[in-house]
Image: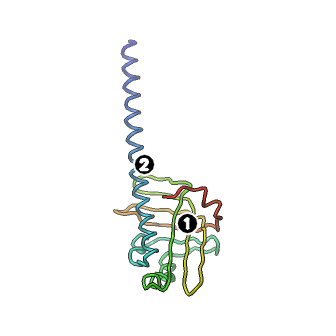
Amino acid sequence: MKHIISLILIFALNSFSVYSQSMENGESSRLESLDNYWLEVSRAVNEGDFEAYSATCHVKATLVAGIGKKAYPLSKALARWKKEFDDTKAGIRQSSVVFRFSQRLGDDKAAHETGIFLYSYEQDGKTGSDYINFEALLVKEGTWKIMMEYQKSLATKEEWDKLKPL
């Protein structure tokens, strides 16, 4: 009987170890996939690639502007941002966005990302940089697509510095 119990315990521990490793590998793969998503968003903004940026957004996505206390379809924001993308692509403007995260939840089909993004620009001698606390809800339909972007509030450089870069 002791041998049976010992075998059961060994089997259970071994199974848990394999399951844990499988979960870690899956989580690592998911985060790598999401990191690639955010790097593509950054690339599209940096290069003024409006089509690529739009492709990262779900057609039914919502933008929640906590600072402005508004919520509306992300498609309206895209229409408003298009000129900035075009100016960046033409070299009239320099734009960049970088992301850092404080929490990353999800599975292989859905993700909720929390962090800060730094958006910077330069145009006509004017420069600006904003640290924005944000949350993003994404779904994976072949590729990751943002469903909801919640730009919660302004953040500080000190808060930004506490988060790890991608």
Residue 83 image offset from top left, x and y in percent: 48, 85
Residue 62 image offset from top left, x and y in percent: 51, 71
Q: Nearer the viewer, residue 14 or 92?
A: 92
Name the residue rendered at 39%, 18% in the picture. Answer: 6
Name the residue rendered at 48%, 79% in the picture. Answer: 78
Residue 40 image offset from top left, x and y in percent: 41, 67
Q: Which mark is residue 10?
A: none
Q: Mark 1 belongs to which amino acid?
A: Phe
Q: Mark 2 belongs to which amino acid?
A: Glu
| CB-based contact (under 8 Å), mark 2 and mark 1 | no
Residue position marked by numbered label 2 in the rendering:
27
Residue position marked by numbered label 1 in the rendering:
117
Name the residue rendered at 34%, 62% in the picture. Answer: 142
Rendered view: 57 above or below 9: below
Q: Quadrant of residue 59?
A: bottom left
Question: Which residue is outermost to the left?
Answer: 142
